[in-house]
């Protein structure tokens, strides 16, 4: 009986170790896709931006207007990729991110600072849903808050 319990215990330990290692690898892969998106935005590489997402991906932007009211925009991947036309003009830094993974779905979210032409433009929260495809992890959709007046003291001190 002791032998059976030892074998079961070792099998469960091996399964748990494998699962933890896979989640660690998936977390790194998911974060790499989000970082690749930011790198391609900075490079003004429309095809590179599109390559990080699924063909039907979209972004919901919740932008605080001058009147204080939110303006909500839904932007498809193709339209989003065309916002970035000058290499080096845009830089997005997402920090203190959190990652949740459940099988072939992952969510990344965290605070970010967006710089335009070397100056802080706005801050907010990014949230991305990713799906595992035959080609690897891809961004299915995302949402961002955009408020130039909502930067924390830490974000105000950040440099591009």
Image (cartoon, helix red, strand yellow):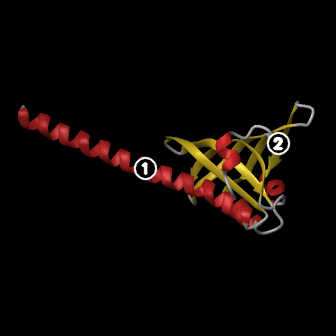
- Taking depth in this image into account, of 82 and 70 the one nearest to the observer is 70
Return the residue nearer the eye: 3 or 43. 43
Circles 1, 2 touching at the beta carbon (< 8 Å): no
Residue shown at 66%/53% (left/top)? 93
Return the disc, 1 or 2, that comes first in the chain's sequence. 1
Q: Is residue 82 left or right of residue 124?
A: right
Near-viewer residue (148 or 92) = 148
> Residue 151, located in which quarter of the rendered image?
top right
**Looking at the image, is 41 positioned above or below residue 121?**
below
Residue 56 appearing in the image: no
Q: Reply above or below: 3 against 157.
A: above
Identify the residue shown where x is 15% and y is 40%.
7
* Residue count near mark 1 (Cα–Cα under 10 Å), binned few <14, some 14–19, many ≥20: few
The residue labelled by disc 1 is: 24
Q: Residue furthest right?
A: 67
Label drawn at residue 160: none
Marking on residue 74: 2
Quadrant of res 63:
top right
Q: Quadrant of the C terminus?
A: bottom right
Q: Residue at x 36, y 45 (%)?
A: 19
Q: x and y percent of residue 8 in the render? A: 18, 37
Percent coordinates x, y for residue 43 in the rendering: 73, 68
């Amino acid at each position: 009986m002791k032998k059976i319990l030892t074998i079961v215990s070792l099998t469960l330990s091996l399964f748990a170790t494998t699962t933890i290692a896979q989640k660690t690898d998936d977390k790194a892969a998911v974060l790499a896709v989000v970082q690749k998106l930011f790198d391609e935005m900075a490079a003004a590489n429309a095809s590179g931006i599109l390559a990080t997402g699924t063909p039907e991906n979209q972004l919901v932007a919740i932008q605080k207007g001058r009147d204080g009211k939110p303006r909500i925009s839904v932007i498809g991947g193709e339209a989003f990729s065309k916002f970035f036309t000058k290499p080096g003009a845009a830089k997005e830094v997402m920090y203190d991110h959190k990652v949740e993974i459940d099988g072939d779905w992952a969510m990344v979210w965290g605070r970010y600072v967006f710089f335009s032409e070397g100056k802080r433009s706005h801050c907010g929260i990014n949230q991305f849903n990713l799906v595992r495809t035959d080609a690897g992890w891809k961004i299915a959709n995302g949402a961002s808050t955009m408020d130039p007046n909502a930067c924390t003291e830490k974000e105000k001190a950040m440099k591009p």
